[in-house]
Structure formats: structure tokens, C-alpha cells
Image: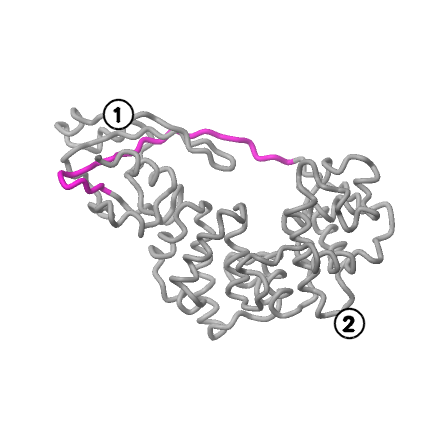
Amino acid sequence: MPAQPLPADFAARIVDWQRSHGRSELPWQNTRDPYRVWLSEVMLQQTQVSTVLGYFARFLERFPSVRHLAAGTEDEVFGLWSGLGYYSRARNMHRCAQEVVARFGGEFPRTAAELMTLPGIGRSTAAAIAAFCFGERVAILDGNVKRVLTRVLGFGGDLSSSAQERALWDLATQLLPPAAQKEAIAGYTQGLMDLGATVCLPRKPSCMICPVNGSCVALREGQPERYPVKTRKLKRSAQALWLLLARDAQGRVWLEKRPPKGIWAGLYCLPVFESREELLAALPRTAAAVAQDLPAFVHVLTHRDLHLHPVLLQGVQPEGEAARWVDAGAWAGLGLPAPVRKLLLEAAPA
């Protein structure tokens, strides 16, 4: 808990700053459409705004409403999502759209509590939708907001502890604009997000232009970068995989649909093996003799390094019930893991 009283004018300063200095040009801003807000919130998890912009536009073009998304196929969703990573987000998003239609008649529920009952919508995402679209007085606590609040309040609790995170949620709720100022909640919520994204940065924050620098404990201490505190870190791991790049005389590639669980679940992919021996054992003996190793490469995930070893096989059809030959013209419409898409493009015949 912070050692000082909560700043009384915090919310008002954030709202005023957002009006004159906050972001307003992003396509999911200045709207009360919960579908657009929800879509942006899901896409922005673990992903930069600059990357999301193109995906957001393509999704809206293909799925202009939650009903359109619910009616789409998982393959279509994965195809449009391909390259964004964290594919569980896309899977949950599709399920969520279907539940909005089935349970709520195609209209998003208006409270954070009800929104949290939908797949893939956590407390902060639910609060963002409820605050922006329906004016509910609820606090968000995404990564940017955690950074702003812990610095301003001097909150030194370790956020890897669920108890400390709950304590910060309580403080975030206390800092909200008064209930009588319902119209201020959207600007306040957007202002906190903007402040964390543009001023209160993880490294070298621009403290001198911050609207709440006069109340900031971290600035007064002279060490804003020590906040937020989160000591538990996931250990990095490494995994080696062998990919069978089988190509026929027409230049088509043999792709299989991955199982619903495990790495690249539900995506179309080159056949994956744990070792080169396992890969060769799955081929006819004559085919194994002509398999050609391509240069290995590393694909970096958040907490794991994938050491990928492609093996090229020309003119032989492998086995696989969930696999088929796919022409290069169809790759763009399939949900492909980013490293597989990169490999296919680089290894395509000239």
C-alpha cells in the first residue's frame, strides 16, 4: 500500500491531459461500439499498436460485426490472425463472438461482471469495454496502467503476488472519477492508457511533461524505473523441432492441420517431428534417401526459443489424414504459424 494519501485531483488531471494531449487518431477510439473496442483490446494484448492497425482494418473488412465473426469459420479467423501470434486469443475471440450471439442476442452485455463470463475476456478487458462503451465506473489495470499507478503511488508490492495485485486493483478503483461524473470515465480510462503508452514509459519516462508529476512518489524518489515490482520471471526454454517441407511437381506444399492442443494448435502447418529420425521414419525408404536438410533457424517466442530444422522432400506425397496439398496462392488465407509462413515464402521456387 502507498505510504501517502491518494492524490485527490488525480482523475481530474488525467481527464484534462487526455483532452489536450491524449491519442485520438486510432481507429478504435472515439467510438462506443463494443465490438470495435473489444476487438482492439484483444489484439493489443502483447502486441504493438503499429502492428495491430493493419490487422484491425482487415478484420473489420471481413467481419464488420460480432454476428459476422460468429458466423465465420475458425480457419478464416486464423487466416486473418496469422502473424499476430498467441493464437489462443483468436480462438477465444471466435468463441466469444459465438457466445455473444447465442447468449446475448448479438449484443455485448453492458457490465464488466457479465462481460467477464465470456471466453477470453478478463477483468481489465471487461472494464475497458464497460467504461468506454457504457460508462460503467470500473477500473482497468493493463500493463501501461499498472506502470502509471505504481509509480504515482509508490506502490512497491510485488505484482507477482495475487494479493498485491488485488491491492492495486482496490487502489485503482478508489482513484476513479466520482460516480456523479459518469461522462468522465471514458476520458479517464483512455488517459491512463495513453499516459502509459506515450509518457510513463518503461525506460526513460518523460516525467517533466507528465500531468501528475507533482503527485508521483517514484519521481520524488528519483527512481521511477524501479516500478512496477514483479520478481517472478518465467524461465526461458528451448525446443528443437523438425519440419517436413514436402513439395510436388506443381509447387504445392503438403500442409496438415495441427491438433486442437499443443504447439500451433488448430493451425495449418508443415508436418512437425521431435527429431530428424522420427521425420525420416514417417517416409517411405526411397523418399527418406532423397530428403534434403535446409538451413536451420531460430524462432523466438516470449519464453521459448524454437530451433527449427526444415527438411525438403520433392515429388513424394507423405501420409496424413488431416493433410493436403496446398497451392501457394492459398497460403495467404490459411492460419499459418509465422515461422512456417516465412519458411514457405523463402523456400518457394523462383
Front position among marks 2 and 1: 2
Please tell me which residue lies in front, 279 or 10.
10
Q: Residue sitting at 23 percent across and 46 percent down?
A: 323
Report helix, strand or loop for mark 1: strand
Residue denoted by label 2: 180
Report helix, strand or loop for mark 2: loop
Q: Position of residue 191 (x, y in %)?
A: 68, 56
Question: What label sits on residue 293 in the rendered view?
Answer: 1
Reply yes or no: does residue 252 show up in magenta: yes
Crowding at label 2, few (<14), some or many (≥20) Cα neighbours within 10 Å? few
Q: Which residues are magenta?
A: 232-254
Judge left or right: residue 58 versus residue 272: right
Name which residue type carries label 1.
Answer: Asp
Name which residue type carries label 2.
Answer: Ala
Of callouts 2 and 1, the N-terminal one: 2
Q: Give how far apart the Cα atoms at labels 2 and 1 are.
A: 68 Å
Judge left or right: residue 337 versus residue 270: right
